[in-house]
Each structure stands twice: as C-alpha cells, then as structure tokens.
Amino acid sequence: MLDAARDLILGSSCLGCGRAGRLLCDPCRDGLDVVPAPAWPTPIPAGLVSPWAATSYDGTVRDLVIGHKEHRLLALARPLGGLLAAAVAAAVDDLGPLSAPVLLVPVPSRPSTVRQRGHEPTTALTRCAAAVLRRRGLGALCVPLLRTRPGIADQSGLDAVARAANLGGALRCDPRALGRLARQGRAVHVVVCDDVLTTGATAAEAQRSLRAVGLAPLAVAVVAATRRRFPPEVPRSPGTG
Ligand SMILES: [Zn+2]
C-alpha cells in the first residue's frame, strides 16, 4: 500500500535500467543471473550447514536488496522473495525427498534497525519466498522464530573475525513463537533464510541458536552471496606478459 502510494506520488522507475514503471521491469527481472548454487564463505564458520545463494551480490540484485532494506521499497519483497525461493528450492533438491514441511526461519534485523526502517525486510521477503514455494507444491512456511539480543553492533564494516565476535550469542529463539510451533506438533525441516551472505557469521549464529532448541537447520538459503575479494594476483616475472 505504502509502496503503491509512493509510486503514485513520486512515480517510479526500474532499478535495473531506469525505465519508468515498475521498480523491476520484466526484461531486467528476466535478465538477472539466477544460478542457485552453494556459496561457501572463506573461511567457513565451524559447522556451518550448506549455504545456498540464488545469485551473487552485485549489480541490479545489490540495488534491489538495498532498495528494499534501506529505502523501504516494499514491493521489492516479491522479486527478492522469488530469488530466495530459488535458493531454498535448490537447497531442498540437494537434500533429497523431504518427509515434512520446510520451515523458513528468517534472520532478524536488530530491533533498532527495525524501528528506524519501520519494517523487517528479511521476514518480508522470506514470507514471499514461502508463498512462491507453496504455489509450486512445496510445503513451506515462514516462521520468524529468532530474536536479536540488544547491544549488537551493525555488521557492515566489520571483518570476519569482528563479525563472529559481535555475533556470539546474538540470536535466540522466541519462547512464544517456539511454543506455538511445538503445539502444532509436526515434524519440520528448518532452513535459515537471509538476504545476503557475506562471512557466514550471521547464518552460523542463527544455526547455533536454532540447534540449541532442537531445531537443527539443514541448510542456509540467501538471495545473494558476496563474491570473495581475493588479493590481486602475484605479478608474473617480467617478460611473460
Ligand atoms: Zn529494467
């Protein structure tokens, strides 16, 4: 609704090509390089389950994620949810036939971030992903079980070691949400969902907190993973080009 109102007032244009109209036009959506694949960070956090990403975090996808998260372009939850669904589907395919529904557990933002931005972006796109998967016949449910402990610093700008330290014990399962799930009394398979995977520290912390309540995740699924920035190649000896 808000997004629709904003579009009416300000007009909108595609984040990919700038063409007036929707925030992601059909050609740009179809042109996204969606190849769901394992996206192991380097170094790999100890014990991390397989992380699957729909694509790499650059170009239009990066603009979509930032537009949704930072600029509250809420309509982007749908295309981003579609990408997340592709990552979840690939992760589930890889696991083989599952006997129970897939529980998609979004990684929460810090409460202060939610207050500032006025929405919970990862939960929004995880709900969209679950809806896409259900339409394709997969029993999938978005269940926001995780909460953030107060006092966690913003992760951006921290390196892998600092992120891991910042996140130690950062997440916990909400007892009420857990109680509601337990009362349903059915077996589930858990997949941790996030928008971007960088060092994997957040995913590992989500995995730890879910495992602590007996809901060990089978996989992690994200919209996009950052490409590893390797140091420049050692220059070859003179004369070899
Ligand atoms: Zn476009």
Image: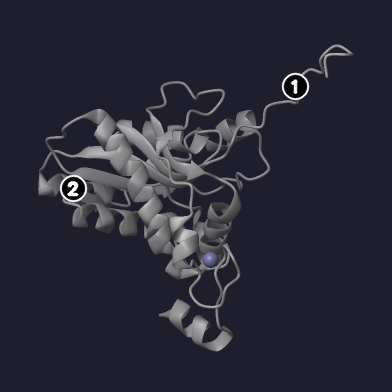
SS for dot 1: loop
Mark yes or no: residue 209 visible. Answer: no
Q: Quick check: 237 left or right of 1?
A: right
Element on which disc 2 rests: loop
| Residue pointed to by mark 2 | 138
Residue 23 position within the rendered picture, expressed as x and y whole percent measured from the top left? 50, 70
- 101 displayed left or right of 92: left
Amino acid type at mark 2: Leu
Instruction: Give the residue pinned by disc 1.
Output: 233
User: Where residue 80 sits in the image (x, y, percent)?
Assistant: 43, 56
Q: Nearer the viewer, residue 32 or 140?
A: 32
For the rendered model, the colour scheme is: one colour
Instruction: Kindly indicate the quadrant of the structure image that contains residue 123.
Output: bottom left
Identified at 16% across, 44% down, the residue is 182
Question: Count of labels shown?
Answer: 2
Q: Earlier in the sequence, mark 1 or mark 2?
A: 2
Residue situated furthest top in the rendering: 237
Rendering coords of residue 88 (x, y %): 32, 42
In the rendered image of this protein, does residue 161 appear above or below residue 198?
above
Say which amino acid is labelled 1.
Glu
Against 9, residue 98 (above or below) is: above
